[in-house]
Structures are given as structure tokens and as C-alpha cells.
Amino acid sequence: MNRTDPISGIAEALRRERARAGLSLTELARQAGIAKSTLSQLESGSGNPSVETLWALAVALGVPFSRVVEPEQQPVRVIRAGGGVPVPSDQAVFTGTILSTCPPGARRDIHLVTMEPGADRQADPHIPGTMEHNVVIAGRLRCGPVGEEIELDVGDYACYRADLPHTYRALEPNTAAVMVMEYR
């Protein structure tokens, strides 16, 4: 994916993964719970997806989130602060930027998540067996499976099942965390 044109990279990845899964446009849209026209726009490179839409598509395709936003792999990769391709949430002031995708043979992705106080970000279950690891690097964060959320301060770490509904809430302005998604 060209970092200056993330939408075309997402479009290419969605077409690739849908073909790999052998799903029609209609069937993938149905399984992801989105409109067929939305998926069509995304695959044509004219849509502007939210993190919720991309997660729903990844779950429906049975792949890690990174596969639908996967940048080109480089032998040495540096993402400067403020770089990368941020994907915003529709529900809250929450942005996820993928830092490292799951290379062949590995089953993890690394994200930088930034958020502001306000509405919770409600995350639907990810693919079965997914574990989420969070380390808070700024502010305070409340996260975890619905009904089992924990509060984390700077430097705190939490791990929990992400194949269950879970939430995120910034408790201070400029909250940020490094999130590792582990796929089993």
C-alpha cells in the first residue's frame, strides 16, 4: 500500500482477500453486516472506511485486521511519530494506526491507538482465538471484555480475549496505547 494513498491499498487488499475466500461481493457484505454498495465503493477505491467497517470485513473474511490494510513489507521499516495510516472510528474519538502487520508464519499485528475522552469504542469480536495486548504509553485507558473492563495507567499492560465484545475508553486527553493483536 502506498502510504500517500491508503484507500487504493485497502481496495486492493479487500479484492485480494475476497477472491482468496471465494466470496461474492453480496455474500461478503452480508457476512460483514455492511451495505453491498459500501463494499463496492471500498473495493473501487472510492470509499472512506472506518475502523469498525474494516474490522467487520476482516472478521467476515476470517483474517487478521492487517490483511485488509496491509502495507508493502520492507526489510527495514521505520514509521515516524505521526506517520503511518490512521483509521478513525465511527463511534468515538479513536484512531488505530497499524505499525507492523502479521508476516507469513507469524500471527500478530502491532497497532498504535490514540483516543480522547467521550464515547466508548465498542469492538465486536475478532476472529476466534484472538488475544489483545495493550500497553498504555500516554494518559489513562479503560478497556477489556464487556463487563470485565480494567483501568490502565501509563506503563500498565493488560491482555484479554478479543474474540468477545470489548470496549475502549480514554480517561484522560491524549490517551495512547500500543496494541498487539495475537491470532491463534
Image (spheres, rainbow, N blue to C red):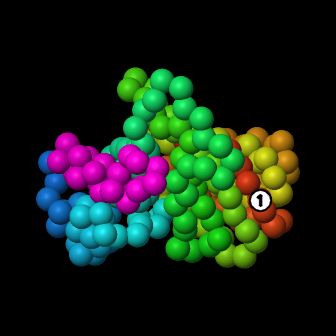
Query: Is 180 on the left-hand or right-hand side of 16?
Result: right
Q: Amino acid at mark 1?
A: Thr
Q: Give x and y (percent) for residue 56.
A: 39, 60
Q: Which residue is rendered at x = 48% and y = 37% of the image?
A: 101
**Segment colored magenta:** 1-21
- What residue do we see at 56% from left, 42% from top? 99
Report the residue marked by disc 1: 175
Would you say residue 164 is visible in this rendering? no
- Dominant secondary structure of the residues highlighted in magenta in the image: helix
All told, the count of numbered labels is: 1
Q: Is residue 168 above or below residue 3?
A: below
Q: Is residue 27 magenta?
A: no
Q: Is residue 124 left or right of residue 42?
A: right
Viewer-nearest residue: 149 or 171: 171
Report whether residue 120 is seen. Answer: yes
Residue sitting nearer the eye, 20 or 166 = 20
Residue 47: x percent and y percent? Answer: 34, 70
Q: Is residue 26 left or right of residue 159?
A: left
Tell me what residue is drawn at x 41 percent, y 56 percent.
5
Q: Residue at x 59, y 35 (%)?
A: 78
Quadrant of residue 148 in the image? Answer: bottom right
Percent x, y of residue 145: 62, 56
Q: Position of residue 143 (x, y in %)?
A: 70, 57
Q: Residues within 10 Å of mark 1 (few under 14, many from 20)?
A: many
Residue in the foreground of this view, choosing between 178 and 83: 83
Q: Is residue 73 above or below residue 155?
A: above
Q: Is residue 3 magenta?
A: yes
Q: Residue lying farthest front? A: 4
Q: Secondary structure at mark 1?
A: strand
